[in-house]
Amino acid sequence: MHKAWGIAIPGLLLVGAVVLRNSDPTPIQEIRNLVFDEYQRLEPRHYDKDLPVRIADIDEKSLAKLGQWPWSRALVAKVVDRLRELGAAVVAFDVLFAEPDRTSPQSVADALPDDPSFQQVKLQMASLPDPDRQLAEAIAKVPTALGFALLDYDPGRPEARPKPVGGFSTLGDSPLDFTKTMPHVVGALPALQAAAAGNGAVNALPDDDGIIRRIPLILGYRPENAQTVPDALLPALGLEAIRVAFQGRSFTIRSSHAQAEAFANNVANGVGAIRIEVPPGGPSIIIKTDRSGALLLHDTGHQPERFVSIADLFDSDFPRSKVEGQII
């Protein structure tokens, strides 16, 4: 009898733990987050300055030198051209270019009074270069990933799925059963998307306490009232930037019930890993995720070495090594 209880009690505890893990109630999530935060404080990630990622910062110095934000797309094009000159591997924008440049000559001309005295000025302004076209031309000359945002609410504007660049293939269960899926999207202007090498979501998914502990690498876009949506999966900006950097062609997502997930199928369902399919001879890039396709963040804290002021990019003595070969 004692022997039976010695087997039954650990078994029941194990079953209970599996049930709790699968149902993941809010109190368990809160306890897990507290423990995770404490681990972050005790042992933050070591910052590796050799990792080829830098942030071109729209800081106060840049605003003082180049003017208030938002800048003209013509100025943004000059920034992109300068990054290309300095040898950037990829330029990734986490700002949205969803509307035509309001500072363009045509927009300014349209805002002028409909008065004969302004006709000559309007004609002259109409002949000036279009800043959005200038930005598209700059983007086309350097591998660029643009950002878009998925939304839970109707933004009240025309919507279109961001231009797909890298496709998806799946092994096992559909990732859409586990990823965050939203019905609305705000993306960059079509002309900019057409010139870009990639498009990625800038969404973050804060926990209930407002703290961001994980970043989704894949998301779903399913418009309201759509029964089936082909190619509903979309990559996050960070994942897309890596694909562009390594000239990847597509992503392969491994989920539960894939052959390689045989053991995990017995205890949990969800996404297991994402592989970037690079050309032959390239590195093997496999990113393990949580069950929703998100990456749990092991934070380094703020590191000034990560940042480059955009104002400094235009200095004649700016060190090329800070940009060359980097994802910016």
Image (tube, rainbow, N blue to C red):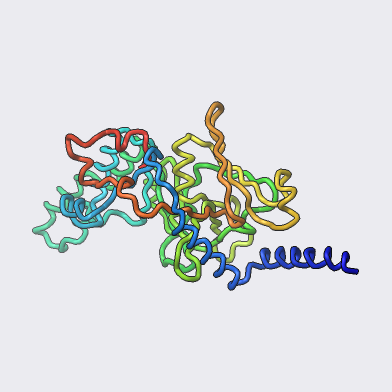
Q: Give how far across and how far down residue 273 sits, in percent.
A: 60, 47
Q: Give how far across and how far down residue 61 sits, in percent.
A: 19, 52
Q: 75 left or right of 27?
A: left
Q: 230 left or right of 108?
A: right
User: Extreme left residue here?
Assistant: 117
User: Extreme top residue here?
Assistant: 281
Regarding residue 59, the answer to whether it shows in the image is yes
User: Extreme bottom residue here?
Assistant: 27
What residue sits 52% from the left and 53% below the top?
A: 295
What residue sits 47% from the left and 64% below the top?
A: 206
What residue sits 49% from the left and 56% below the top?
A: 215
Q: Give how far across and how far down residue 232 sits, in percent.
A: 57, 53
Image quarter hosting the C terminus: top left
Q: 207 left or right of 63?
A: right
Nearest the viewer among 146 and 226 is 146
Q: Is residue 244 above or below residue 12?
A: above
Image quarter hosting the N terminus: bottom right
Nearest the viewer among 81 and 310 is 310
Using the rendered view, name the quadrant where residue 325 is placed: top left
Regarding residue 232, the answer to whether it shows in the image is no
User: Extreme front residue here?
Assistant: 2
Q: Give how far across and how far down residue 125 sits, in percent.
A: 17, 49
Q: Is residue 312 above or below residue 95?
A: above
What residue sits 63% from the left and 52% below the top?
A: 271
Q: 168 left or right of 95?
A: right
Number of marks in the rendered image:
0
Nearest the viewer among 307 and 192 is 307
